[in-house]
């Protein structure tokens, strides 16, 4: 990761983009690191975030414009220079409150200072950005010319064409476009209120008094949507009154519906949000075994449990595919939230869109193995919930249906939700419809 300290919002965003490209860093972690290094808060922190996420979310569109104005093939441009140019193009073509001279001038300075560029390269970048700024002002930017809707959505929203075509086949062409558009929108901070400590209205009033904009989530009653500040540093977070968690994750645990005094296994528990909510719904009474394959993630779960004042969580180092003999037939409730492609959380991790179809091809096999193992922990009459943070059918309903064919002692359980109504055992939550992460939930029960 780049060692220098950024001086302003644009440098912060550029450094985060460099870290994503050069170090395979997650944009969220890299951005947070450089925001802290620069001492940014308020408007500057928000601008750095918008530039980082916006550039990643619109990379194909930025490249489309650059390819029309650059005499050098994009593949021949130095990676840092190209990332900086993308950020400049994003400001010029997709943000309407940034003066063109600021977008051009600051981008050129970043290229001069941090991209090991000679004056010829600096002049090239300046010329390209000025030409785009001039045509943007005159309304003469090149128009997209795509053979069909799917290729248009793929370019307009910078998401893989194979992914858009999969969405179109699964949800229909119109809904595919709406999902793609929603994937590029900013996601507010989603916090769940610990009802053992406060009510949502009490928390909202406190956060608003501290300058945050807060509204209730339309899907989950204990979720508040917040903008205008970092909730992870707020005193209510530090004392365990709130925790960062998406509404889809809350709906998943509500579907599991664990009861106080019962035995629960969370098979792939990191980063711990679902385990925390499970323990709260259990009123911290009973036994919750939270498993993960990485010890450092288990340490974070244990830290979070202490912050929230939860004592019923027992962390365990375990591979979700390998049976834990003492848990076989032990649990009343099992949550199997499996590793997945992540194509439901593009709003929050925009770099996921750069995965290829080949990279995720073997995931259903791994997911099926974890589901198979998790089912062994369910006692007769017990409940099993399978979930992912993707919207792709091959990782969701197809895995569940294959499991049910092989295990006649399990069946789908219809359930209801106060917003979604009656559900026939499986549901896919979509950012375009439900203002949540893209998320899949299936509820199964083992025969008595």
Image (cartoon, grey):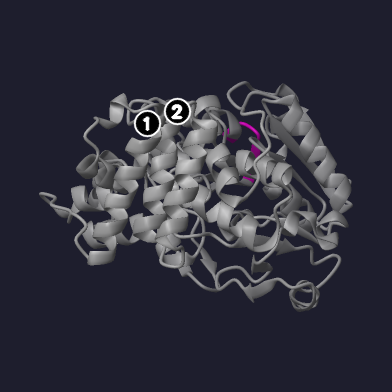
Q: Is 149 placed above or below 123 here?
A: below
* Residue 141 x/y as whole percent: 21, 57
Does the image show residue 442? no
Looking at the image, which residue sits at the far front?
119
Q: Quadrant of residue 178?
A: bottom left
The answer to whether marks 1 and 2 mark residues whose Cβ atoms lie closer than 8 Å is: yes
* x 80%, y 60%: residue: 234
- Classify mark 1: helix, strand or loop: helix
Which range is magenta?
375-381
Residue shown at 72%/32% (left/top)?
Answer: 297
Task: Give the CA distance from mark 1 to mark 2.
Answer: 6 Å
Question: Image check: 85 left or right of 244?
Answer: left
Measured as percent of width and height from the top left, residue 393 is found at 35, 44
Circle 2 — which element? loop
| Above or below for 223 versus 314 | below
- Residue situated in front as seen by the camera: 36 or 381: 36
Left or right for 304, reference 228: right
Compared to residue 428, the image places residue 290 above or below, namely above
Instruction: Write the residue at 66% across / 45% down.
Output: 7
Residue 380, magenta (yes or no): yes
Horizontal and vertical percent position of residue 224: 66, 69
Instruction: Estimate the x, y position of residue 196 in percent, counting from the top left.
Output: 84, 65
Describe residue 177's horizontal placement relative to residue 408 as left or right: left
Q: Is residue 192 magenta?
A: no
Which one is nearer the viewer's eye here, 129 or 230?
129
Give the numbered dot on residue 121.
1
**Can residue 433 be seen in the rendering of this structure?**
yes
Please give the residue where the numbered disc 2 appears in the rendered image. Answer: 117
């Amino acid at each position: 990761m780049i060692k220098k300290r950024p001086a302003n919002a644009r440098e912060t965003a550029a450094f985060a983009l460099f870290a994503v490209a050069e170090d395979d860093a997650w944009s969220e972690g890299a951005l947070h690191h450089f925001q802290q290094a620069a001492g940014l808060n308020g408007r500057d922190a928000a601008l750095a975030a918008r530039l980082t996420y916006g550039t990643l979310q619109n990379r194909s569109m930025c490249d489309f414009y650059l390819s029309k104005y650059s005499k050098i093939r994009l593949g021949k441009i130095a990676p840092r220079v190209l990332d900086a140019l993308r950020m400049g193009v994003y400001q010029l073509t997709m943000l309407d409150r940034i003066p063109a001279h600021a977008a051009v001038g600051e981008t050129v300075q970043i290229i001069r200072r941090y991209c090991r560029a000679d004056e010829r390269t600096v002049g090239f970048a300046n010329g390209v950005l000025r030409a785009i700024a001039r045509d943007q002002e005159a309304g003469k930017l090149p128009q997209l010319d795509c053979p069909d809707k799917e290729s248009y959505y793929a370019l307009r929203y910078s998401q893989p064409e194979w992914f858009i075509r999969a969405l179109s086949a699964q949800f229909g062409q119109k809904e595919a476009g709406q999902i793609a558009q929603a994937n590029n929108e900013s996601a507010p901070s989603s916090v769940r209120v610990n009802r053992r400590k406060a009510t949502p209205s009490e928390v909202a009033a406190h956060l608003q008094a501290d300058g945050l904009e807060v509204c209730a989530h339309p899907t989950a009653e204990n979720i508040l949507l917040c903008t205008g500040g970092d909730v992870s540093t707020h005193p209510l977070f530090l004392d365990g009154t709130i925790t960062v968690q998406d509404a889809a994750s809350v709906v998943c645990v509500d579907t599991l519906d664990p009861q106080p005094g019962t035995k629960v296994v969370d098979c792939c528990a990191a980063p711990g949000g679902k385990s925390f909510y499970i323990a709260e719904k259990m009123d911290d009474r009973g036994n919750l075994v939270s498993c993960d394959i990485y010890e450092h993630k288990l340490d974070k779960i244990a830290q979070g449990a202490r912050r929230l004042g939860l004592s019923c969580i027992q962390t365990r180092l375990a591979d979700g595919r390998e049976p834990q003999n003492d848990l076989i037939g032990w649990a009343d409730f099992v949550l199997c939230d499996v590793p997945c492609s992540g194509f439901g959380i593009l709003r929050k991790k925009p770099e996921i869109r750069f995965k290829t179809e080949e990279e995720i091809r073997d995931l259903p096999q791994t997911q099926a193995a974890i589901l198979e193992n998790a089912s062994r922990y369910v006692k007769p009459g017990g409940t099993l919930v399978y979930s992912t943070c993707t919207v792709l059918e091959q990782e969701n309903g197809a895995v569940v249906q294959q499991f049910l064919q092989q295990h006649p002692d399990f069946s789908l359980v219809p359930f209801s939700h106060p917003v979604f109504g009656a559900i026939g055992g499986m549901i896919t939550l979509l950012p375009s419809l439900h203002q949540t992460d893209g998320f899949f939930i299936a509820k199964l029960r083992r025969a008595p």
